[in-house]
């Protein structure tokens, strides 16, 4: 006997889907590829529209206790001059915070919550998806058991949700000629370092321009008065061909990038000092994939990075996967007796929205003002208004908020996405 819904992938999007479906009384199970769930990665940002959904799932208090509610986003030039700052989260009038925390912490909170609510027999690690067969009443997912036994497992379900990431087996099976992710030439060295609070200790900092950029934000307050600060040091190369699969756990070499930032010493932050205080870094190329013209085949659909991997610009990747989970749940709840319609309406809501974000991020998303300032005043400026107007910046930032779905007015009702009306296709 199969499950009503099977989720292949126990990452953030997959677990958010499992918790959402379970809350609605829908029979759901999860299979995850890695044999042991570990708190891997570095920092992550969750925007208010995603936090609204995590609040509805009952995990916000736990996440707030292990993260930082960011109150400000600030753009600086490569010389450390302030370009723009704006309030974020509750400081901007939202009912929910913008939350910064360790990616592994978020993963473990969702994982432990899923085990508590669904049961350990429904959240099974060490099952690597190898193929999916379609049939009239759903699909059968085939897994390789990664316990050294050489065994396999086949699981039947009315709906299979592929939450198996940027290297999705389901996506590759459906689009075998798609190949490696697309790389724009930028390399990101990411890490977390114990450091003194930057500015007032609640600001997300973006400094530089598209060819060289530094991002930093706190993800945890420490007992010694310091903070755990997540940072990204980014540098663009002329290369475009990706020869290896990217991996969040591939070690970076400080000597490969830190010298490029040696003169980025500002009166409010000594970036070389921060980088050299880091215990290590992870190297990651900035990659995405082209938007697809369909996510669903039969009773199998894509979600999260399997559906719409995007550049890490604008703090949107994980947030969009959470939104996918909630819309999919609302659609399945509304059309429980018609899974095909449920999947069609889910895709009609989410595929165009996320495709627009993928393309917006390729166009630098909310970071465009930093490029314009660098192009217009590479040697610095006396007054930022002589270089770029507040209206020009607001056009970019407000436009991105609308595209990404977290404009303030869009969240004013406080209603979770699960409770939207999914009776018909969106207009």
Image (cartoon, helix red, strand yellow):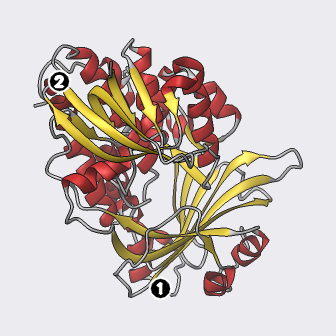
Residue 26 bears which disc, if any? Answer: none
Closest to the observer, 2 or 335: 2
Q: Is residue 73 above or below residue 423?
A: below
Residue drawn at 49 percent across, 75 percent down? 187
- Can you identify the residue that label 1 sits on? 378
Q: Quadrant of residue 68?
A: top right
- In the rendered view of the protein, which quadrant contains the N terminus? top left
Is residue 106 depicted above or below 310 in this figure?
A: above
Residue 188, image x, y percentages: 52, 71
- Residue in the image at 20% along x and 30% along y: 343
Dot label at residue 137: 2
Q: Residue, x 38% and y 54% (percent of image)?
A: 397
Q: Residue at x 60, y 53 (%)?
A: 43
| Label 2 vs 1, first from the N-terminus | 2
Q: Secondary structure at mark 1?
A: loop
Residues at badges 2 and 1 in contact (C-beta under 8 Å)? no
How crowded is the residue under tag 1: few (<14 C-alpha within 10 Å), some, or many (20+)?
Answer: few
- In the shown orientation, is residue 375 left or right of residue 298? right
Q: Is residue 95 visible?
A: no
């Amino acid at each position: 006997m199969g499950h009503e819904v099977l989720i292949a992938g126990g990452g953030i999007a997959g677990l958010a889907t499992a918790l959402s479906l379970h809350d609605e009384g829908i029979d759901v199970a999860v299979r995850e590829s890695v044999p042991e769930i570990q708190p891997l990665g570095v920092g992550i940002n969750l925007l208010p529209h995603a936090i609204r959904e995590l609040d509805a799932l009952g995990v916000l208090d736990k996440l707030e206790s292990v993260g930082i509610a960011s109150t400000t986003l600030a753009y600086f030039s490569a010389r450390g001059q302030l370009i723009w700052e704006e309030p974020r989260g509750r400081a901007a009038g939202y009912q929910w915070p913008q939350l910064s925390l360790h990616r592994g912490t978020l993963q473990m909170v969702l994982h432990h919550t899923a085990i508590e609510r669904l049961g350990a027999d429904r959240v099974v690690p060490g099952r690597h998806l190898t193929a999916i067969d379609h049939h009239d009443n759903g699909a059968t997912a085939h897994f390789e058991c990664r316990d050294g036994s050489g065994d396999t497992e086949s699981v039947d379900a009315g709906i299979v949700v592929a939450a198996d990431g940027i290297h999705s087996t389901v996506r590759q099976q459906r689009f075998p000629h798609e190949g490696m992710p697309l790389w724009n030439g930028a390399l990101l060295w990411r890490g977390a370092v114990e450091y003194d609070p930057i500015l007032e200790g609640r600001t997300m900092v973006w400094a530089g321009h598209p060819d060289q950029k530094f991002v930093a934000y706190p993800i945890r307050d420490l007992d010694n008065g310091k903070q755990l600060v997540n940072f990204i040091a980014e540098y663009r190369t002329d290369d475009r061909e990706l020869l290896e699969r990217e991996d969040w756990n591939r070690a970076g070499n400080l000597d490969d990038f830190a010298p490029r930032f040696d003169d980025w010493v500002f009166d409010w932050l000594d970036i070389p000092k921060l980088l050299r205080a880091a215990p290590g870094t992870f190297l990651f190329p900035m990659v995405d994939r082209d938007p697809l013209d369909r996510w669903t085949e039969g009773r199998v659909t894509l979600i999260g990075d399997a559906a719409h991997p995007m550049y890490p610009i604008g703090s949107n990747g994980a947030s969009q996967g959470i939104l996918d989970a909630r819309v999919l749940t609302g659609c399945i709840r509304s059309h429980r007796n018609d899974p095909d319609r449920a999947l069609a309406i889910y895709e009609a809501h989410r595929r165009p929205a996320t495709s627009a974000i993928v393309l917006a991020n390729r166009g630098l998303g909310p970071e465009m003002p930093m490029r314009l300032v660098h192009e217009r005043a590479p040697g610095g400026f006396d007054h930022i208004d002589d270089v770029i107007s507040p209206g020009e910046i607001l056009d970019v930032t407000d436009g991105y908020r609308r595209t990404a779905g977290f404009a303030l007015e869009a969240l004013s009702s406080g209603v979770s996405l699960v409770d939207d009306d999914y009776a018909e296709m969106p207009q």
